[in-house]
Image: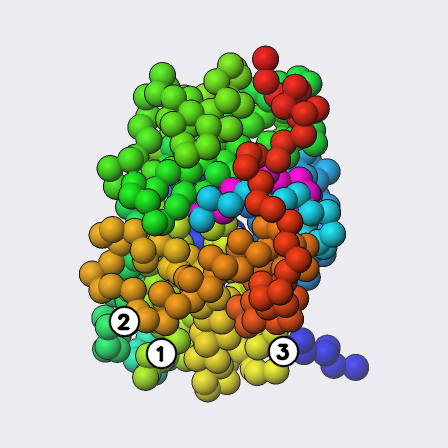
Amino acid sequence: MPDRVTPRRPTAVVIGASAAGLFAAAALTEFADVVVVERDHLPDGPEPRRGVPQARHAHLVWSGGVRAFDELLPGLTDAVVARGGRMARIMGDMVSRAPNEVWFRRFLSTHHRNAVCSRDLLDAVLRDRVLGDPRITLRQGTTALSLRGDATRVTGLRVRGADGTEETLDAALVVDASGRGSRAATWLTDLGLPRVAERDVNAGVTYATRIYRAPERAGDSFPLVNVQANPAKAPGRGGIVLPVEDGRWLVTLGGTRGGEPTADPDAFARYALGLDDPVIGELIEHAEPLTEVFTTRSTANHRRYYEKMKRWPDGFTVLGDAVAAYNPVYGHGLTVAAQGALAVRDTLRSAGLTAPGTARRLQRAASRPVAAAWDLAVGQDVFYPGATDTPPTAAERFLARFVDRAVATAARNPRAMSALLDVMSMEKPATRLFSPDMLIPMLFGPKKPHLDRAPLTEAERKAALP
């Protein structure tokens, strides 16, 4: 009998081995062999790397992201927990003050669970899971230089290896998941396409992060403590205490123009004590610091509207922060990365990888979680002085007022809280805020009184404070 000929699978090239790139690679293995091009050399374990400087700061994965993680890579969040991460009940395991200075009650009736750990741990677990797939090849120390093809179809990626040698990687699909520093907009104009429309909303936030040893009595179940900045006050200041693996508290403080935290270790706790509510400062004032203070100013919301371009080449898609990057305080970047990869997978299940128009469909499908996260972030940040050259629109002002009422209602009513968290967690669209679960408590009550202090229990205060 003649040998059976097995059709060769197409090749997809993914630029970037951070979360968005790895999720994209995982989604694409169903349809192609995947080459991941990464400029850095990746660490073997949960360690920082140059290409992800934001990893030093606090990260949350909302329940919409948790669902996407496990749909794309079943058991991924269990693996994070097995290595020291935690699934926190929101709001039961969180002490949180909203931007309008309302403390949320710690309702236990919501189904929402957020993944809590250091970004380094999450990235390590994700690398182990994705890069262990034999259908994926990693090219470390390799820099993406330019697209190959023309305005109608991208056919590959020009790269430079660690030894300086340049070559072209042929591909049926090139995915740019290279993050905030993406050069996709320039590459597309080099192919003869028009410049993509972009928008910046920059609240001018500086973040400062330091890790502390958690008090021994606090244990592994101490709640997250979050004081959100108020856009109605300038400068806006806030912070979060994130209990992470290995008995540590990852503490991130943030302030807008004129109220920025610094890298001065002696000023870190003082800054926290100076927040509108001093609870974070009180928690860390006598705690043992384990690191220096790390700062970043790379916090602007920046979006590129690739899905609206009139012409789009086959064979090319942009995902993750390369499409839109957000103020990290809202914690939606990782969720968008996973949901965008799911959109790619689901679209390809009904469209051929190389079929004309597939790349445009991929770009539009991936834009839906991008738009949801963008509206949540910009709906707050646009009100900070100097955030944008154009003032908030009438629609943005109306929505902001409505969200303030929704937050005030949710702080005191579990049905409304569940509706708010459905939206904030990116499990459901913003129209959920106009459901009976929100509108009936908002309009008629009954409502519990607002809390006048952080809802830490006495046992938690005793465990954390000297």
Tag 2 near tag 1, CB within 8 Å: yes
- What's the residue type where badge 1 is placed? Lys
Residue 6: image quadrant is bottom right
Give above or below for 301 relative to 305. Answer: above
**Which mark's residue is nearer the viewer, 2 or 3?**
2
Name the side, left or right, on which 3 lies relative to 14: right
Q: Can you see residue 40?
A: no
Residue 196, given in percent of the width and then of the height, sits at: 28, 72
Distance (Cα) linking label 3 and label 1: 23 Å
Residue at the bottom extreme, as displayed? 356
- What's the residue type where badge 3 is placed? Arg
Q: Name the residue rendered at 42%, 62% in the picture.
A: 401
Q: Which residues are magenta?
A: 90-99
* Secondary structure of the residue carrying numbered label 1: helix
Check the picture and name the quadrant holding the C terminus: top right
Give above or below for 23 relative to 204. Answer: below
Check disc 3 and report the residue beneath it: 349
Tag 3 near tag 1, CB within 8 Å: no
Q: What colour scheme has been applied to the protein in the rendered image?
A: rainbow
Distance (Cα) linking label 2 and label 1: 8 Å
Q: Can you see residue 423?
A: yes
Nearest to the observer: residue 78 or residue 400: 400
Check disc 2 and report the residue beneath it: 197
Nearest to the observer: residue 279 or residue 255: 279
Q: Name the residue rendered at 53%, 53% in the picture.
A: 408
* Secondary structure of the residue carrying numbered label 3: loop
